[in-house]
Amino acid sequence: MEVKSCVREFIGAVSQYNNKKSNGNLLYLQKQLEILHGLVNRTACRRFFNRRHMLAIECITCLVDIVGNVHNKCAPKCVAVLNCIAQEDDMREMLHSTYNICPSVADLLMSYEGTSADSLSSECLRLLQKITYGYHISIQERFMEQLLKYLINEMILSTNSLTEPCLGLLANLCRDNYPVQMFMRSRDNSKRLYKVLISHFCDQNLTMAVYAFSIFASVCLPEKIADEVFDAENINQSLQMMFNILVNSDSGMTLVYAVDLFQDLLKHHKFQESLQRYAHLQECITYTLKLISRGTAETMAKLFGLLLSFCSVTGVYSMMCKAMFNIQTSVGAGYYQQMLAGPVTLVSEPLFATVHWAMQSVETSKLASLAALDLLTEVYEEVLYSGKRDQWCLHMDLLLPVLVNLLKISVTGEINIRNKCLKIVKAVRFLTVLCAEDDLKAAVSDLMDVNIMTNLLEYQFSHNQLLLLKKTASCKGQNDWSMVGVEVVLVCLELMSKLKKHVSGMQSFFTDLIQDSRLVPFLAAGVTSGDRSVVQLALKLVCFGSTLDEFPDIVLGDAVAAMNAQKGETRCSEAEHRQDTPAPFQHYDVQSLLSSKETLSTSGSRKVQEPNESSSFDASIQMIIEKMQSTLEVKDMRASEIIAIYEHRIQSLQTNAEHLQNLMETKALALTQADRLLQQNRAREAHFEAETHTLKSLLHEAERKNDDYLEQLNSKNLAFENLRNDFDLQKMEVERLEAKASELEVLKNEHATLLEKFQIQERTFSSLKQEHRTLREMHEILQKHHECLKHQHDITTEQLSVLEDESKQLARILKDKENKLQEVTKSLLAIEERHKKTLRDKDETEKDKEALELAVNKLRSDIGRAEQLRRELQQKVSACCIVGFSHTVV
């Protein structure tokens, strides 16, 4: 409701502004545009914009009208809104085909060319890129030449934010468009354009790289220059670049353009041959298959298309099968059935991811589910018919229930009936391929039921548009699913013919169905189809039905003739419509043919409806018929057959007469048209004579300018000669670079070998580095311990030196004391001698003796103390020496 109210407010604001262009109404319109832009940025709100909502169609019409007026200030914001709406496929198709918005957006872009760096130019370019993708734009369009010049100049002059959308838009315009490619090759700055494109090949932005490569390939491949540019080495590098872009693409648009480019390259036999010889093809295919579990439904549809293109290249088919079925797992089917119930991103194996996409509904992923079924059919067909089935596990316990469930799709309603029928056709064809093996046929028969086929066929018999009396306008175009319904019936009958002996009740149901008159229009449409496989399938069923007694072969012949006549009239009416003249369209009632079966069996003849009673030819035919009815009597089956043969011949003559009548009417209308053209030419001739005088004056002016241009041409020729010399020098430089490139390839191989050795040495170095780190930590610990011990040793050495000085000083003192003791001893000896001498004078020297004894006692006490001091000093010296020695040992 929020979107509807916003759209209503916007439509009212547009109507109010158109009635009165005031500033207030303009501000109100801009406000509503801002609100609408905020809503369409959300995916849920964008779904409101589709063909079924008249309010949405009216809103888009208002937006397109505003964009068509370049002077409207709301045009830039309208482009931004349309850019969001154009993200949906249906809206892109509507904006391009129904509204033809490309000229309006191009005019708006050209009007703001002076300020090309603003956001409006970017929005216009991105909108044009979205709308032109997948469409062929004629260069005769009034805006094309100016737009191409703008895009080329914008890319050559500078690289900015507009470079990427310019490259994308130019890639759309020149793909499969030979006139645009010729225009780009004929430009004076084409060589400069090539250099700019080549410079983008190595861009870090993969989107710009794939855009540039797509433009370069589109312009160069159709010409002879492709043989020189794309040699064997360049093709290998191109393949490597394409696989790198596929695997490393960070956006869905990059993947889509890369797939389109890859498919265009594979159309050339040189790329196919190089792909077969590509050294890393198996790894690249494996990486490409892993992309199936990543991306949206649109990108997956493109990726499946590329994988199907790979299947068309000889030698790549087997690699695809190997990569799909090479699943190294012991997990049971129950695990994958549980995984398939979740999102596809949880499935990593390519086979199961493809099955997961095939399970998706056509509403959410229309093209992806159909393309996934096509890929599975191709891969399984290769495995079964190549005799390599025993090499891989086919996982039938997982695949068959999925295929049978696809046949139970509800095709009721009015939406996506065509796509649902297409999915049923592909699923049935897949089951038909699997029925080539007896054991697989038995497995399919166990899961198949007659009711499944009954529901599919009954819906077609009741609702298929082939059986309608008149096709309305809504039954034509994209909504016409009648031929797809014919394929549903035919492929179901083919599958039933293979399973009729294995499924209970299938054989009787199949036999009755082949003889059912309701099947006649489907067989007739199959026989007259333009698809070879459908025709072959219909003929197989007709051949089988012709062996049955009650097969309606005569009614089938009438239906085929009627459908051929209807197609002839359709072609005539289309030719008349191209001449802008109304033409009657005659509808054939197929039900009347069915109801005539009983009449033919009783009377043996049938009256032919005559478009013109007054024709003598038709009158003669009517007379022959009446004569045959009056003269011949149906007595046996032989006469009835003769009558049927004449009837078919008469009907073919009538059909030829109708064709001739239609051709005559067409010629008459063409003659009338020619007369009208002659009158127009006479009026234009007078106008051209008036313009001739103007052209004469312009011719004189052109002659004068021609002389000036001739002088410029001479200077250009001189410059061209200089450029040719430069080109020769550049060619020699290219040859030198090619030689360097070959040397570089050899160096690459050597580099790979050295890189492997380097990795081994690096692992050894890492282990040695770890060991070195451990030893270094131990060394640091020992170093700290050594420093501590060294400090203690220095302190002890200082103390030892001090003690040695003290010991020396004490030794000197002791020596002095010893000298003094010797002197005292000598003095004592002298005194003793004197004592002996004076003993006799004892009495006389008594007093002297006592004095001397006192002196001797005193000296003896001093000597004892000195001796004791000497012993202590010796003990200290010896203790210090022992401590110093112990530190030295440690």
Image (cartoon, helix red, strand yellow):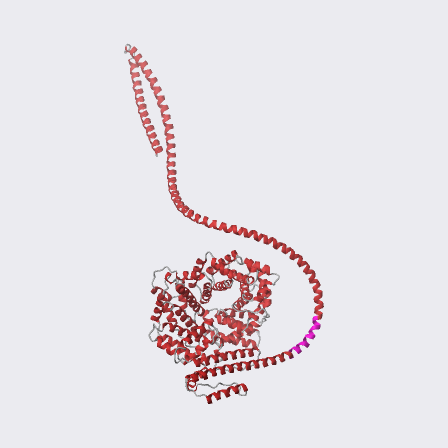
Q: Is residue 828 visible?
A: yes
Examine the image and state in which quarter residue 490 appears: bottom left
Q: Residue at 69%, 73% (x, y): give it.
A: 691
x then y, percent, for residue 448: 35, 72
73 and 502: which one is in front? Answer: 502
Residue with the most extreme bottom position: 630
Magenta range is: 679-695
166 and 566: which one is in front? Answer: 566
661 and 830: which one is in front? Answer: 661
x then y, percent, for residue 93: 51, 71
Q: Is residue 393 left or right of residue 45?
A: left
Q: Is residue 885 left or right of residue 225?
A: left
x then y, percent, for residue 353: 40, 64
Q: Is residue 687 magenta?
A: yes
Q: Is residue 690 magenta?
A: yes
x then y, percent, for residue 220: 56, 61
Residue with the most extreme top position: 840
Q: Is residue 28 visible?
A: no
